[in-house]
Amino acid sequence: MGFFERAGRQVEKFKQTAKEVADDNADYQCQSCNARFNANDDQCPECGSKEIVSTRAGE
Ligand SMILES: [Zn+2]
């Protein structure tokens, strides 16, 4: 296995971890499909539902 191949795998792993952290920190969640996102939209970017709740409500 070459250096670049190894480095590429680590980048992929890092990107996966970063995405999971981003999901955990998402400020909004769709009540219809449970998608999480940070954008302050009045519609879910995944399914278009308007059942959006803030995940920060308890803080
Ligand atoms: Zn949704």
Image (cartoon, rainbow, N blue to C red):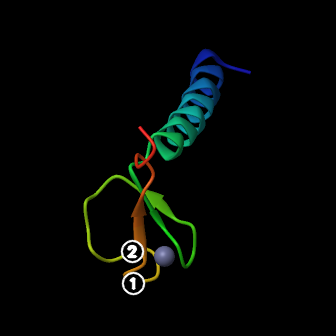
Q: Residues within 10 Å of mark 1 (few under 14, many from 20)?
A: few
Residue 35 location, x and y as percent? 52, 65
Quadrant containing the N terminus is: top right
Mark 1 belongs to which amino acid? Gly
Give the numbered dot on residue 48: 1
Left or right, 26 with respect to 40, comes to right
Residue for point 42% across, 83% down: 49
Residue 19 location, x and y as percent? 51, 42
Left or right, 1 with respect to 25, comes to right
Element under disc 2: loop
Left or right, 2 with respect to 49, comes to right
Residue 21 location, x and y as percent? 53, 35
**Which residue of the protein is positioned furthest toward the right in this rendering?**
1
For marks 1 and 2, give the CA distance: 5 Å
Disc 2 CB within 8 Å of nearest ligand 1 atom: yes
Give the residue pinned by disc 2.
Answer: 44
Mark 1 and 2 residues: CB-CB less than 8 Å, in contact?
Answer: yes
User: Which quarter of the figure has residue 8?
Assistant: top right
Element under disc 1: loop
Disc 1 CB within 8 Å of nearest ligand 1 atom: yes
In this rendered view, identify the residue nearer to me: 38 or 9.
38
Residue for point 53% across, 41% down: 24
